[in-house]
């Protein structure tokens, strides 16, 4: 009798266990269509780090993808759930995209600073509004969706930033020149035109240094943008945190080049500046806003008022001493500005010791004390919201200044601001940066940044809202 080793097809029935299909989460970074031409400037693009964090908080049982309109215009893709982030200037576009999915019966979720400031408005255009911080609430959103109990509103309490998730950098578009990393959250200041204090409940929190360093090691970008609202903070503890970060970057030999926002008190700690340079700092961005003490008081820019405009050059000199170039940001259209003040500020920016200057038009962003005051005085231009939010980018005139006609103000900007970025001045500033810092790196950073601002200024005309 022969032994049958292999059975026939009828003898055995093989069946694979059913593969559970992953649910699809689509995360979208919308592009403000009013200023979409600016997206051609890759140097000015900031990666949507918040979407990377949301992706990291999403279980592995989901297929997560990111559509980033900074690089590719939105096209409909199948999804089970859609998450969108938006600054105020992006909110109208976010609502447009959300409407596409709502028509298909696909739930849409909106987060970001605009939703935090105006959740009632956002609720009219999306299915679910998430306010607060994703780290403490996104798992609940996913759980409720999976159980079929998705709510209209969620709020995430402030995170302690411990065991902070590493963003899904693999899902962010590889075209970003700068890798984005956050080391702190919030800002210890309380400027009346800034929504950060309201968003973070006036807290300033510090991430674990080793977690940040591990994150930096994992990023392929050599160039890093620390997206903190204030990298160094305002007290001893926050300074020590920043110095520990810089020392860690040095010890691990990360070989990164970076820039970040800092406040004027950076000039009070030379050891911090020295470590910053050794760790790869090429440029510091400092919010100056105005050269007039009375306007610093008006905008509640207390630290600048305490240090005094007469001492701005001392801070710049210290950073130059250690080979770091300095970008000073200014505002035109402060409520007390007259046409003469605008002319004087532009002249000051040209002659100031800063290697790079950036001017923004005063904008009353929702959630700020400035917005509340301007709205109460009925000086917001136009009432076509949410469409008019696309002009709230700091590049257009959206309210009536006290001492200027809006069209007159726009004429001054068109006439004066391009002179800040003339080819001749850009070259002269680069030479001056090299002379002051003795650093070719600093000089090149100053030149490239000024050149980038020149392109931005020449690319788009200023808009005065009329309806």
Image (cartoon, rainbow, N blue to C red):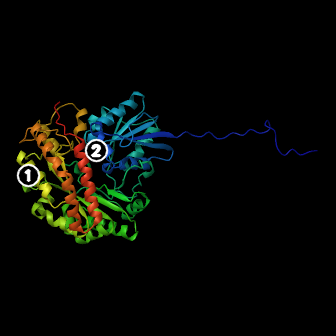
- Give left or right: position of 303 versus 115: left
Q: Residue at x 33, y 32 (%)?
A: 96
Instruction: Residue at the far front: name it.
Output: 424
Q: Is residue 234 visible?
A: no
Q: Quadrant of the N terminus?
A: top right
Q: Residue at x 26, y 48 (%)?
A: 199
Instruction: Residue at the far right: name it.
Output: 1
**Disc 2 or disc 1, which is closer to the eye?**
1
Task: Say whether disc 2 or disc 1 marks the residue closer to the N-terminus.
Answer: 2
**How many numbered discs sit on the rendered protein?**
2
Q: Any mark on residue 457, and which?
A: none
Q: Name the element at disc 1.
A: helix
- Give left or right: position of 48 versus 423: right
Q: Residue at x 45, y 43 (%)?
A: 65
In which quadrant of the rendered view does residue 367 lie?
Answer: top left
Binning the other alpha carbons within 10 Å of mark 1 as few (below 14), some (14 to 19) or many (20 upward) gives: few
In the rendered image, residue 434, in percent from the top left (x then y), is placed at: 24, 65
Q: Name the element at disc 2.
A: helix
Q: Is residue 343 above or below residue 224?
A: above
Instruction: Residue at the far top: name it.
Output: 103
- Give left or right: position of 257 versus 366: right
Which residue is nearer to you in this view: 53 or 59?
Answer: 53
* Mark 2, residue position: 113
In the rendered image, residue 354, in percent from the top left (x then y), is placed at: 18, 60
In the rendered image, residue 285, in percent from the top left (x then y), is placed at: 24, 58
Binning the other alpha carbons within 10 Å of mark 2 as few (below 14), some (14 to 19) or many (20 upward) gives: many
Q: Are marks 2 and 1 in contact (CB under 8 Å)?
A: no
* Mark 1, residue position: 344
In the rendered image, residue 29, in percent from the top left (x then y), is placed at: 36, 42
Marks 2/1: CA distance? 33 Å
């Amino acid at each position: 009798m022969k032994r049958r080793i292999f059975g026939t097809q009828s003898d055995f029935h093989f069946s694979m266990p059913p593969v559970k299909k992953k649910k699809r989460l689509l995360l979208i970074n919308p592009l403000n269509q009013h200023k979409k031409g600016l997206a051609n400037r890759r140097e000015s693009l900031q990666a949507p780090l918040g979407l990377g964090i949301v992706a990291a908080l999403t279980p592995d049982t989901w297929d997560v993808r990111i559509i980033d309109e900074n690089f590719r215009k939105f096209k409909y893709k199948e999804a089970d759930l859609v998450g969108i982030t938006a600054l105020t200037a992006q909110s109208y576009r976010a609502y447009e995209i959300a409407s596409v999915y709502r028509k298909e019966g696909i739930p849409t979720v909106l987060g970001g600073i605009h939703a935090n400031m105006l959740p009632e408005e956002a609720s009219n255009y999306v299915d679910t509004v998430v306010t607060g911080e994703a780290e403490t609430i996104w798992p609940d959103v996913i759980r409720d969706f999976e159980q079929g109990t998705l709510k209209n509103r969620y709020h995430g309490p402030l995170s302690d930033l411990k065991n902070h998730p590493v963003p899904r950098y693999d899902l962010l578009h590889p075209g970003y020149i700068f890798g984005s990393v956050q080391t702190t959250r919030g800002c210890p200041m309380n400027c009346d035109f800034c929504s950060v204090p309201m968003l973070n409940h006036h807290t300033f929190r510090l991430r674990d240094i080793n977690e940040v360093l591990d994150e930096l090691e994992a990023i392929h970008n050599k160039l890093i943008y620390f997206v903190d609202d204030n990298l160094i903070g305002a007290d001893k503890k926050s300074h020590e945190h920043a110095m520990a970060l810089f020392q860690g970057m040095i010890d691990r030999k990360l070989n990164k080049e970076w820039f970040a926002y800092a406040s004027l008190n950076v000039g009070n700690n030379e050891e911090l500046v020295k470590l910053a340079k050794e760790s790869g700092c090429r440029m510091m961005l400092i919010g100056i806003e105005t050269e007039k003490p009375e306007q610093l008081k008006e905008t509640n820019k207390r630290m600048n008022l305490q240090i005094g405009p007469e001492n701005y050059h001392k801070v710049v000199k210290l950073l130059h001493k250690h080979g770091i170039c300095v970008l000073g940001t200014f505002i035109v259209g402060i409520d007390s500005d007259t046409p003469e003040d605008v002319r004087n500020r532009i002249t000051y920016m040209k002659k100031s010791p800063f290697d790079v200057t950036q001017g923004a038009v005063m904008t009353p962003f929702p959630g700020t004390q400035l917005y509340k005051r301007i709205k109460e005085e009925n000086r917001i231009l136009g009432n076509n919201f949410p469409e008019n939010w696309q002009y709230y980018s700091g590049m257009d005139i959206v309210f009536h200044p006290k001492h200027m006609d809006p069209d007159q103000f726009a004429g001054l900007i068109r006439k004066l601001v391009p002179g800040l970025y003339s080819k001749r001045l850009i070259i002269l500033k680069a030479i001056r940066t090299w002379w002051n810092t003795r650093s070719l790196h600093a000089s090149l950073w100053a030149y490239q940044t000024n050149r980038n601002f020149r392109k931005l200024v020449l690319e788009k005309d200023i808009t005065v809202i009329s309806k």
